[in-house]
Amino acid sequence: MTTLGSVLLASIPSPTQGVWFLGPIPLRGYALCIIAGIILAVWIGEKRWVSRGGEPGAVLDISMWAVPFGIIGGRLYHVISSPDLYFGEGGNVLDAVKIWEGGLGIWGAIALGGVGAWIGCRRKGVPLPAFADAVAPGIAVAQAVGRLGNWFNNELYGSALEAPWALTIYRWDAGLGQAIRDSTGEPLVLGTFHPTFLYELLWNLGVAALVVWADRRFTLSRGRAFALYVAAYCAGRVWIEALRIDPAETILGLRLNIWTSILLFLAAVAWFVTHRGPREDLTPHRRKRSATAAGDDDDGGGGGDDGDNGDNGDADDQVAGSPFERPRDDLRTAEDELASDQPAGRPTRHAAGPKPADL
């Protein structure tokens, strides 16, 4: 008879508890891993964005749009790709909103998160492809950290395996976030399986390193670094997904995620090959925003001799270069003429107007 001790010694152990309580507040391992991954992704993306000449703080601002959209999209994709868990026999529709119990589909997160990033980029006035290139390695790292959340939930494992790197999985109560125990208090072991969460974790770290290296070596631009991330991730997801045994929708005998990975791999390779060109210069976008901020301060500040120039300056900018533009020297000459009651162009004690040839 196989004992719990012998199983643990011959395999990778899994946690028997995935939620802890700080008073009445539950602290879930899955949620903590997702949050840690998001923080790392924003931090890495910010460093890469600034190193490319982008405005500091832009990645965080855009993430305020991308992250909520991405979480919603990830959950929607998971529910759509695994409908039997929620709408099938024995399923509970209300469980579809329980994100803390696990279940975020990366493709839904990327798709809807991309919509949020597009909104944020438009508001910041920066090109979306350049932003995607900057955050691509960080997204891969975030996925790697997020896979640890699957480990806390005893999920995302493959077929049965007997090997030193096999993963021990317990019979799990998703509602309580802990292993089911027998009458003696020992957690019930379901078996040992391929640690597909660990395979994907390591693969994602490799993808992040690949994108960083290729970006430095070949100066990738116009969304090509992001396309490389998508292609490299999909290449690994195909074989890792084939090992999984959890319920999922299938098409022609293949899991939906495999078909999705194949199609996105081809699309990413096509983008990588066709979108060549020099790297985007983000300095003009940065200068434009700085100038806009400075102009707003000047218009709102007032004071001194320039206090009345806020609206006039805008009007002058609008007529500059038009047929109705009036030179400033003409304005000053007319003012001097009225003040001295003498024709313009004659020296006065108040002011010396320009000569007619200078007008």
Image: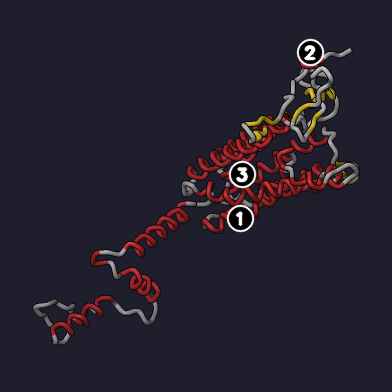
Q: Residue furthest front?
A: 24
**Mark 1 surroundings within 10 Å by alpha-carbon count, few (fewer than 14), some (14 through 19), many (20 or more):** many
Say which element carries label 3. helix
Whether 213 is drawn above or below 282: the answer is above
Q: Earlier in the sequence, mark 2 or mark 3?
A: 2
Tell me where residue 81 appears, x and y as whole percent. Answer: 81, 46
Residue 167 visible in rendering: yes
Q: Earlier in the sequence, mark 1 or mark 3?
A: 1
Quadrant of the snapshot with the C terminus: bottom left
Residue in the foreground of this view, choosing between 174 and 334: 174
Spatial CA span between label 1 and label 2: 52 Å
- Residue drawn at x 69%, y 43% as measured from the top left: 230
> Residue beneath label 3, please?
225
Residue in the foreground of this view, choosing between 109 and 96: 96
Spatial CA span between label 2 and label 3: 46 Å
Q: Residue furthest left?
A: 349
Residue in the foreground of this view, choosing between 116 and 139: 116
Tell me where residue 17 appears, x and y as whole percent. Answer: 72, 27
Say which element carries label 2. helix
Q: Earlier in the sequence, mark 1 or mark 2?
A: 2
Q: Which mark is residue 73?
A: none
Tell me where residue 156 appears, x and y as whole percent. Answer: 77, 33
Tell me where residue 296 appears, x and y as whole percent. Answer: 39, 61
> Residue beneath label 2, please?
5
| Amino acid type indicated by mark 3 | Ala
Dot 1 and dot 3 residues touching (CB under 8 Å): no
Mark nearest the camera among 1 and 2 is: 2
Say which element carries label 1. helix
Mark nearest the camera among 1 and 3 is: 1
